[in-house]
């Protein structure tokens, strides 16, 4: 973009298969409100060769981030070593984007873009992050963030923060980036940086943990709180169908409280609780 902002997502072979996650992700941009133009600023970061080849079939801007010694092509199950390696590789890559002077919106590919989010961001924040659960204030450090969606301005504060975040993986071994973030957001180092941090309201940036109930306000919806690729795909397809129905409604009907999502379905939070799995993915 004119201000050196780029939209980034990562892709591996498991999410790159035809009729899978990446197809739904790109479709959401095409049918969203004011989102089609944003595809001109989206770069897909391929984590393996198969994902890179598939990206080239689908999109103009692809970047290969194949890591020697790591195999990221399969579905990385939550909290396995492959998952941890991939998440920390992502944090280090985003740090390098900031070092190049680019602002970025990072988005997981299991996030559907239904409305241009830029008017809903905080203009004076350095670092903004979506939430699994939002407690009413964008300044409340006790909000439960989700690293799958962030908007970060390139400046000295954010560069130092990402260095600190990445180095903290050694302080807290076995934790993933999101859990480490939940610890270091209270750290005096971050406070002394003067980092202007805001948490995004799930009313606009929702997910299956806490859906955005008003489709007139929703920008993005994340298939979080969900285990298994097939379950994610099932609920993502329903989201797209619900949005397509919504945009065809007369204006008066769109304001009805009965117009909302049919999800979660396969990705029910109750199913997660019974499984004993962590409440975010």
Image (spheres, rainbow, N blue to C red):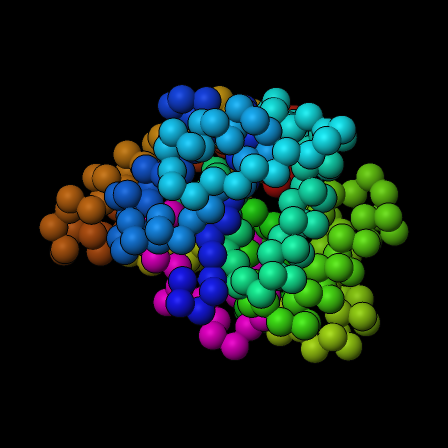
Q: Quadrant of residue 183?
A: bottom right
Task: Locate the N terminus and report the quarter of the image it occupies.
Answer: bottom left
Q: Quadrant of residue 246?
A: top left
Residue 246 in sight here:
yes
Give the number of marks.
Answer: 0
Residue 262 in sight here:
no
Front one among 137 and 205: 205
| Residue at horizontal 34 percent and vertical 57 percent from the top | 116
| Residue at horizontal 61 percent and vertical 24 percent from the top | 73
Residue 234 in the image: x percent, y percent?
Answer: 41, 26
| Residue at horizontal 21 percent and vertical 39 percent from the top | 245
Front one among 3 and 19: 3
In the rendered structure, the answer to whether residue 19 lies left or right of residue 183 reads: left
Residue range highlighted in magenta: 113-136
Residue 247 in the image: x percent, y percent?
Answer: 20, 46
| Residue at horizontal 61 percent and vertical 50 percent from the top | 147
Task: Locate the C terminus and report the quarter of the image it occupies.
Answer: top right
* Rendered position, 211 above or below 80: below
In the rendered structure, the answer to whether residue 257 lies left or right of residue 266 reads: left
């Amino acid at each position: 973009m004119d201000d050196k902002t780029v939209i980034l997502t990562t892709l591996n072979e498991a999410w790159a298969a035809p009729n899978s996650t990446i197809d739904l992700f790109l479709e959401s941009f095409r049918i969203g409100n004011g989102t089609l133009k944003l595809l001109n600023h989206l770069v897909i970061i391929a984590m393996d060769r198969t994902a890179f080849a598939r990206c080239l079939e689908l999109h103009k801007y692809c970047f290969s981030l194949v890591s020697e010694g790591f195999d990221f092509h399969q579905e990385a199950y939550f909290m396995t070593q492959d998952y941890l390696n991939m998440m920390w590789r992502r944090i280090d890559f985003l740090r390098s984007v900031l070092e190049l002077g680019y602002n970025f919106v990072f988005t997981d590919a299991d996030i559907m873009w239904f409305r241009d989010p830029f008017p809903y961001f905080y203009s004076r924040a350095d670092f903004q992050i979506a939430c699994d659960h939002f407690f009413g204030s964008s300044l409340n450090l006790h909000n439960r963030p989700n690293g799958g969606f962030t908007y970060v301005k390139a400046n000295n504060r954010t560069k130092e923060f990402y260095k600190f975040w990445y180095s903290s993986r050694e302080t807290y071994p076995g934790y993933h980036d999101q859990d480490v973030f939940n610890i270091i957001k209270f750290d005096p180092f971050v406070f002394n940086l003067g980092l202007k941090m805001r948490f995004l309201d799930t009313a606009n940036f929702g997910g299956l943990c806490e859906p955005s109930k008003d489709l007139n306000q929703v920008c993005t919806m994340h298939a979080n709180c969900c285990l298994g690729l097939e379950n994610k795909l099932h609920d993502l397809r329903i989201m797209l169908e619900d949005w397509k129905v919504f945009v065809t409604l007369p204006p008066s009907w769109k304001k009805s409280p009965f117009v909302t999502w049919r999800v979660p379905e396969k990705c029910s939070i109750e199913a997660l609780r019974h499984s004993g799995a962590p409440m975010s993915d």
